[in-house]
Image (cartoon, rainbow, N blue to C red):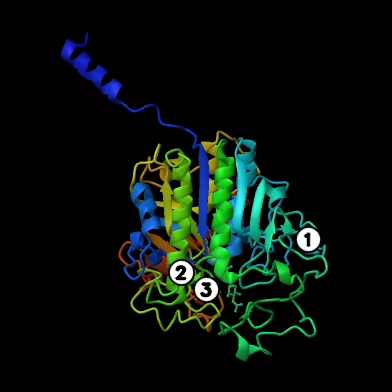
Amino acid sequence: MMKLPALLAALALTTTLPAAEPARPRNIVIIYADDLGYGDLGCYGATRVATPNMDRLAREGLRFTSGYATSGTCTPSRFALLSGEYPWRRANTGILPGDAALVLDPARATLPSVLKRAGYITAAVGKWHLGLGAPGVPLDWNRPLAPGPREVGFDYSFIMAATADRVPCVYVENQRVVGLDPQDPLRVDYDKPFPGEPTGVSDRAKLKLDWSHGHNMAVVNGIGRIGYSTGGRAAQWVDEDMADTFTGRAVAFIGREKARPFFLYFAPHDIHVPRVPHPRFVGKTTMGPRGDAIVQLDWEVGEILGALERHGLARDTLVILSSDNGPVIDDGYQDGAVTRLGDHRPAANFRGGKYSRFEAGTRVPFLVRWPARVQPGVSDALVSHVDLLATCAALAGQTLAQNDAPDSPDARAALLGDSPAGRAYVIEHAGKLALREGHWKFIAPAPGVAVQKNTNTETANLAAPQLYDLATDAGETKNLAPAEPARAAAMAAKLALLQQSPRTRP
Ligand code: NG6
Ligand code: CA
């Protein structure tokens, strides 16, 4: 029998224990930044730009040091996040033009469809870049655009179709172009210019922001874009207002739906090109538009966090912040990003960047905050965006069918900080694949340039296999493949096996 003092102590313990931990977050918010580098945030070491709101998320939540996007560019990473499937298994999941058809399959489970099934009202606000309309059917921008976000599970959407550097430069709300004048129909063509419309070549001298490579087709708001368009003038966005517009819609969604559980996928344009922050952010850093766009992005994050607080939802809302791929300095406009970079290191101590299979391509900022459940701290667990579908499904009490989300494991233990161990491996994708297993990194041989000419990014393409020990060489400087051929061969075999198997979810 327990002695009285012990019994009292046990009782005291039980009475001071907090209420049972919630299994399910009241709301889920994913903030998916664009081209934001690991080293672009104060909480990951940046000193030349202040990011107080993202730093606060890190302080109040878990900051992952080995969080990965699946891919080194946007469309494939977003595809993986929303479908739970590696993009390299599917055709047409590379960087999409602005008039591409929807690449997500409405017949299959998606992150929003699973959460919708679980009773969350769902919204996508910001960058889409996953296509609109049916394959093979030319899109008429003057009519409802379907299939799109709604057909894959988003109740509400306020998006741009692709990227801000691609036409059409208009907002699309619930799959209709916003503010379109029927007398001035919008047309888009990615092959040939519309006669009489200026281009970034014909009107180069008049541009507000000159291009450095690409971005010399249609001119909208004095900025050259990718692709041609005509008409739809009244609907064209103002680049400087884009952060306010998207943030405003996201905050309004939270306010409108605060009475019931919601899932918000908020995908800011920042810090992708063209970097044209609102005048109130101009000059906030010494780095020019790229730095100022980080400040603007941080403001956007602050607005979302503020809305959650205002409505009393912060404690019970799971907020995840990450980036679709690593950083790039010159991505096609002469915006001073290269000349004004100074000693800021967007990729921290990693090699490569956007478009790369070196670590900086896919190792991204990754923050998880859920005050009611997640203890603040730092986690070195390997986690990937592709985990989020099955993880959120499990949190929401949903079971997945065998064929759903074939590459998405339930990573609750790592993502909620219950376990320091994450995945055994991550696959890193930019053109070809690479494999990180524990602290070893194997990069499969690939043809192609070692350094992308215009962006000046090291791609990691090499005719020979590469092997790095990230524990001692995070910057991937010393190729150990010649010295450790057996390890390189074993990792090559494992990567080939993973690539060939139709699914990796247990
Ligand atoms: C590239 C663009 C780049 C950017 C990228 C997509 C040129 C020369 N470069 O083709 O500016 O738009 O595509 O970026 O056009 S992503 O983050 O959406 O993947
Ligand atoms: Ca991107």
Whether residue 363 sits left or right of residue 73 in the image: it is left
Three-letter code, disc 3:
Arg
Residue at 39% across / 61% down in the picture?
Answer: 440
Q: Quadrant of residue 437?
A: bottom left
Badge 2: residue crowd in 10 Å (few <14, some 14–19, many ≥20): few
Q: Quadrant of the C terminus?
A: top right
Three-letter code, disc 2:
Arg
Disc number lying in front (1 or 2): 2
Among the two numbered marks 3 and 2 on one chain, the one whose residue lies closer to the N terminus: 3
The residue tagged 3 is: 275
- Pick whichever, 55 or 96, lies toward us: 55
Residue at 51% across / 80% down in the picture?
Answer: 455
Among the two numbered marks 1 and 2 on one chain, the one whose residue lies closer to the N terminus: 1
The residue tagged 1 is: 135
410 up-or-down from 266: above or below = above
The residue tagged 2 is: 280
Residue at 55% across / 39% down in the picture?
Answer: 258
Disc number lying in front (1 or 3): 3
Say what secondary structure mark 2 lies in: helix
Three-letter code, disc 1:
Pro
Q: What percent of the width, then of the height, locates residue 173?
A: 69, 56
Whether residue 352 is visible, yes or no, is no
Instruction: Give the CA distance from mark 3 to mark 2.
Output: 14 Å
